[in-house]
């Protein structure tokens, strides 16, 4: 089976531009998580979905960040407008309901905002 | 709220030596505990998990961890380090009644010297 697929793997953009990160979870997984990883703050949970419905978005930094999951096989994380402090690696992960904590991670999207 | 604290952001051992990575948790109810490993430029992958069954948990690649309620600890060990074990290791906690969201520690980077 294919794992969690994220795109793009690398993105370099200028401050103020819109950034869209994409994620395809593992088929059959009904939870999807977005994490951000930085040296200073480690791994932060931004938002997670269950059956395509956002359950907890308390980790979303501010209104510039938004996430959607229009169907079971696709999710996006959008930053508009982007700022240099948004530079990080963004990970998507998914899991089945029955397997608490057993997340399968994508390889991440490394974002650099100049 | 639950949390985990990893003692030591960097641990260095010689090849063949014992690996001990420390993790303490804080939770008002019995938690689920996990260790994940992250190799350079990759996502995280599950090493092992504790879900209130046996207190000594065996994982992949020869790693194991022991849940000690009296010490609120879940330290990760491996009897003999291998060069391929060099990576970053994350301890994580989850409460099933919170939808299973995973909260990660700050990570411990393991270096293995030849």
Image: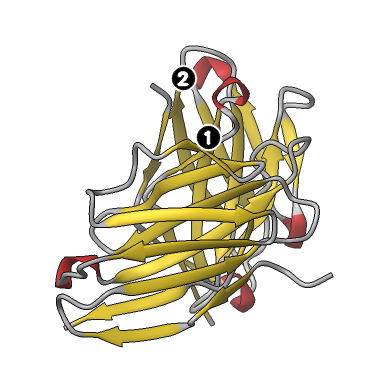
Q: Residues within 10 Å of mark 1 (few under 14, many from 20)?
A: many
State whether residue A69 is above or below residue B110: above
Across and down, in percent, residue B39 comes to 54, 73
Q: CA distance from mark 1 to mark 2?
A: 9 Å
Asked if residue A29 can be seen in this view, the reply is yes
Please identify the quarter of the rendering in which residue A58 is found: top left
Q: Nearer the viewer, residue A59 or B5?
A: A59
Quarter occupied by the C terminus of chain B: bottom right
Relative image position of residue B68 (x, y in whole percent): 59, 23
Where residue B33 sits in the image (x, y, percent)? 60, 34
In which quarter of the view is residue A74 placed?
Answer: bottom right
Quadrant of the frame with the N terminus of chain B: top left
- Name which residue lies at 25% across and 49% down: A61
Which residue is under mark 1?
A: B93
Disc 2 chain ID: B
Q: Is residue A16 left or right of residue B5?
A: left
**Is there a contact, CB below 8 Å, between mark 1 and mark 2?**
yes
**Residue B19 sits in which quadrant?**
bottom right
Q: Which mark is residue B27?
A: 2
């Amino acid at each position: 089976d294919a794992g969690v697929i994220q795109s793009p793997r690398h993105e370099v953009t200028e401050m103020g531009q819109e950034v869209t990160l994409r994620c395809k979870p593992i088929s059959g997984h009904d939870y999807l998580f977005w994490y951000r990883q930085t040296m200073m703050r480690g791994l932060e949970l931004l938002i997670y979905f269950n059956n395509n419905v956002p359950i907890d978005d308390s980790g979303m930094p501010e209104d510039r960040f938004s996430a959607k999951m229009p169907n079971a096989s696709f999710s996006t994380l959008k930053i508009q407008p982007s700022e240099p402090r948004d530079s990080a690696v963004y990970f998507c992960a998914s899991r089945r309901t029955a397997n608490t904590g057993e997340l399968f991670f994508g390889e991440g999207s490394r974002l650099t905002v100049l | 709220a639950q949390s985990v604290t990893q003692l030591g952001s960097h641990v260095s051992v010689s090849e063949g030596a014992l690996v001990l990575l420390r993790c303490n948790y804080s939770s008002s109810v019995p938690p689920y505990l996990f260790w994940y490993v992250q190799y350079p430029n990759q996502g995280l992958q599950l090493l092992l998990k504790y879900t209130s069954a046996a207190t000594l948990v065996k994982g992949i690649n020869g790693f194991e961890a022991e849940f000690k309620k009296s010490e609120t600890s879940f330290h990760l060990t491996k009897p003999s380090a291998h060069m391929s074990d060099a990576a970053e290791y994350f301890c994580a906690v989850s409460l099933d009644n919170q939808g299973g969201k995973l909260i990660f520690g700050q990570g411990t980077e393991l270096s293995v010297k030849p």
